Image (cartoon, rainbow, N blue to C red):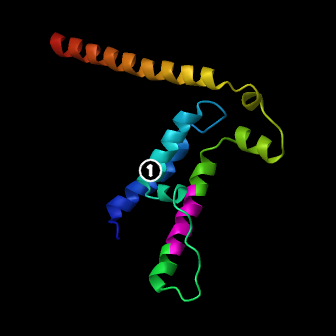
């Protein structure tokens, strides 16, 4: 499968702009997870999260070798994007066995309620913008 220069440029821009998205800092995991899954799906590498790596065989075909190498490359990229999406506050304390305030005081119900509130506010903001545009169009 070949990609045109325009498509690969767009994917490259998407990947480089991902660092501008919020990093996971210990709260609102589901939102971060959905955004990460969207990015990995857009880059067409999300399949490595669900698909096991092909085993190496002594007499395997060239196509099977290429498919395994493709999976290895996608897995490497996937891991890089996931690690890039985690803030140091989450990664470093876990690496050295320390827990941060956010991880020790995490409450799933409170996080879910905050996510629902944010989603509700999105609809309110959209409605307010629609009304504002209607008023502006009417006043012209």
- Front-lying residue, 121 or 6: 121
Q: In the figure, residue 79 lies in which quadrant?
A: bottom right
Q: Quadrant of the N terminus?
A: bottom left
Residue 120 drawn above or below residue 96: above
Q: Is residue 81 visible?
A: yes
Q: Residue at x 64, y 43 (%)?
A: 86
Residue 28 left/right relative to 13: right
Residue 120 left/right relative to 29: left
Q: Residue at x 50, y 18 (%)?
A: 117
Q: Quadrant of the C terminus?
A: top left
Q: Residues within 10 Å of mark 1 (few under 14, many from 20)?
A: some
Query: Does the segment drawn in magenta span residue 84?
Result: no
Q: Is residue 140 visible?
A: no
Residue 98 left/right relative to 130: right
Residue 79 left/right relative to 104: left
**Magenta residues, as a range?**
68-78
The single residue placed furthest to the right in the displayed view is: 97
Q: In the figure, residue 19 lies in which quadrant?
A: top right
């Amino acid at each position: 499968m070949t990609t045109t220069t325009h498509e690969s440029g767009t994917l490259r821009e998407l990947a480089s702009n991902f660092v501008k998205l919020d990093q996971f800092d210990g709260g609102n995991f589901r939102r971060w997870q959905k955004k990460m899954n969207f990015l990995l799906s857009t880059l067409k590498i999300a399949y490595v999260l669900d698909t096991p790596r092909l085993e190496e065989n002594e007499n395997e075909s060239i196509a099977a070798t290429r498919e395994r190498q493709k999976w290895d490359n996608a897995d490497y990229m996937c891991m890089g994007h996931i690690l890039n999406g985690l803030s140091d506050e989450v990664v470093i304390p876990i690496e050295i066995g320390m827990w941060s305030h956010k991880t020790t005081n995490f409450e799933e119900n409170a996080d879910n309620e905050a996510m629902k509130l944010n989603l509700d506010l999105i609809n309110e903001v959209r409605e307010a913008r629609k009304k504002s545009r209607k008023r502006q169009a009417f006043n012209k």
